[in-house]
Image (tube, grey):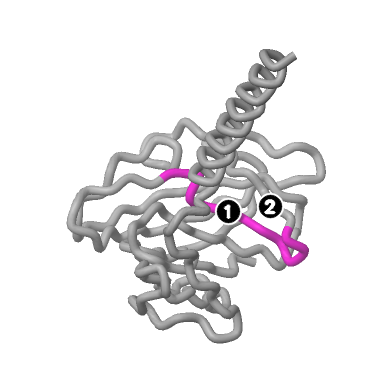
Amino acid sequence: MEGDTLKTGKNSILTALLVAAVLTVAMTLAGCGSAKTPAKVDSEAPAAEGAATEGGTTEEAPVAQAAPSAIGDKVTSGDWDLVVDKATGVAEVEGDIKAADGNELLKIDITLTNNGTDAGSTGPAYFHLVDSTGGEFQATPTNVQGWIFNMNPIEAGKSAKTTIVYEVPEGKEELTLSFEPWSDKASAPAQVTVR
């Protein structure tokens, strides 16, 4: 009997040690150690740009999104300037792409300027055409050299003209082109009302 009690006592101690070890590992993985919890930022009073939080990290000030500009206006996002030169509804583009019945192709001619310090690329993924309800249209792939799907990188300080095409319902109004290139600068998308 005495041996059984000793055996049970050893099992209880081993079980307790195992449970303590598992809890210690779990708490460490969950971050319940001595690390400070980052400060909560009040959404009504954001931290100033570059201000240190309780955890020692810095917070960037949110970037306000401006109202959409008009065709011909220069707008900026990150290291890029965008000017929408014109937007024209057409039935077909360069003979190889035709709009479906009840639709038209909105051909948007743009000028992009790279204000960065290195050559930069852009493409259709950085552009979004949205209507007044938030509905989004996808860029129509084209094979015209120099258009958005076949653009070369733009050297620092240089500009390039290109075209992006969207298929939209015929006569659709209240359309905004949004341009948000990849950038290490905090910036809002550049927006231009194209119709």
133 falls in the magenta region: yes
Mark 1 or 2, nearer chain start = 1
Residue with the most extreme right position: 102
Residue with the most extreme front position: 2
Picture quadrant of residue 20: top right
- Along the horizontal axis of the image, is 108 left or right of 9? left
Task: Name the residue type under label 1.
Answer: His
- Which residue is nearer to you in this view: 35 or 117? 35
Q: Is residue 14 above or below residue 31?
A: above
Pinpoint residue 195: horizontal percent, then vertical percent. 64, 67
Disc 1, disc 2: CB below 8 Å? Answer: yes
The boundaries of the magenta stretch are 123-134
Task: Name the residue type under label 2.
Answer: Glu
Mark number, residue 136: 2
- Dot 2 alpha-carbon crowd within 10 angstroms: few under 14, some 14 to 19, many 20 or more: some
Helix, strand or loop at mark 2: strand
Residue matched to label 1: 128
Picture quarter with the N terminus: top right
- Dot 1 alpha-carbon crowd within 10 angstroms: few under 14, some 14 to 19, many 20 or more: some
- Which residue is nearer to you in this view: 143 or 189? 189
Say which residue appears at 37% left-offset and 78% top-offset. 49
Q: Is residue 162 above or below residue 184?
A: above
In whole angstroms, how far apart are the C-alphas of marks 1 and 2? Answer: 7 Å
- Along the horizontal axis of the image, is 10 left or right of 29? right
Picture quadrant of residue 176: bottom right
Say which residue appears at 67% left-offset and 48% top-offset. 137
Residue with the most extreme bottom position: 45
